[in-house]
Image (cartoon, rainbow, N blue to C red):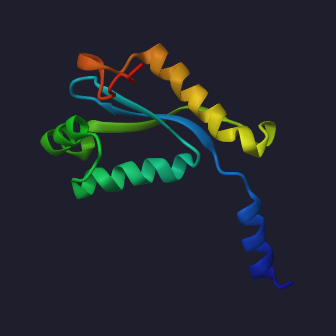
């Protein structure tokens, strides 16, 4: 196998960082909390959507348009180690971690952009 194929194969086998992230509006302190199976991809996707003015969260999009990208920070709140979680349980583990942080940070109403989940 040539070197390029080896590197490509190693890349595909490397588990992606997964966990919970936060987008914070530094002007008003509001936060958006979400989880991703691929944290770098999730963060890039959110930035891309906000820059294209097509983010699914309308309140976040409105503030992004009003204050500009410089008013926001993107942070990883907590990661999970993919090697320590069976592959078929990873989505459930990420969802549980997201729920933990939603309960802890309560990013609803005046504090954030998330909508409470319907019971």
For image coordinates 13% across by 40% down, the residue present is 66
For image coordinates 63% across by 40% down, the residue present is 91
> In the rendered view of the protein, which quadrant contains the N terminus?
bottom right
> In the rendered view of the protein, which quadrant contains the C terminus?
top left
Seen from this angle, which residue lies furthest right? 1
Seen from this angle, which residue lies furthest front? 119
Q: Position of residue 116 (x, y in %)?
A: 36, 22
Seen from this angle, which residue lies furthest bottom? 2
Residue 18 as seen in the image, left or right of residue 89: left
Seen from this angle, which residue lies furthest left? 66
Q: Position of residue 7 (x, y in %)?
A: 76, 72
> Can you say whether 72 is above or below 108 in the image?
below
**In the depicted view, which residue is nearer to us: 70 or 65?**
65
Residue 15 as seen in the image, left or right of residue 53: right
Q: Position of residue 53 (x, y in %)?
A: 21, 53
Quadrant in the picture for residue 32: top left
> Can you say whether 52 is above or below 61 in the image?
below
Quadrant in the picture for residue 8: bottom right
Residue 94 as seen in the image, left or right of residue 21: right
> Can you say whether 19 is above or below 69 in the image?
above
For image coordinates 57% across by 32% down, the residue present is 95
């Amino acid at each position: 196998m040539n070197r390029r194929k080896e590197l490509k194969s190693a890349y595909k086998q490397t588990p992606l960082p997964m966990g919970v992230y936060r987008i914070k509006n530094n002007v008003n302190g509001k936060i958006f909390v979400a989880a991703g199976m691929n944290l770098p991809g999730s963060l890039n996707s959110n930035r891309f959507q906000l820059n294209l003015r097509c983010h699914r969260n309308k309140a976040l999009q409105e503030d992004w348009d009003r204050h500009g990208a410089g008013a926001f920070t993107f942070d990883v709140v907590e990661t999970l180690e993919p090697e320590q979680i069976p592959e078929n349980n990873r989505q459930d583990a990420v969802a549980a971690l997201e729920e933990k942080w939603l309960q802890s940070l309560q990013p609803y109403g005046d504090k954030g952009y998330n909508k409470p989940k319907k019971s």
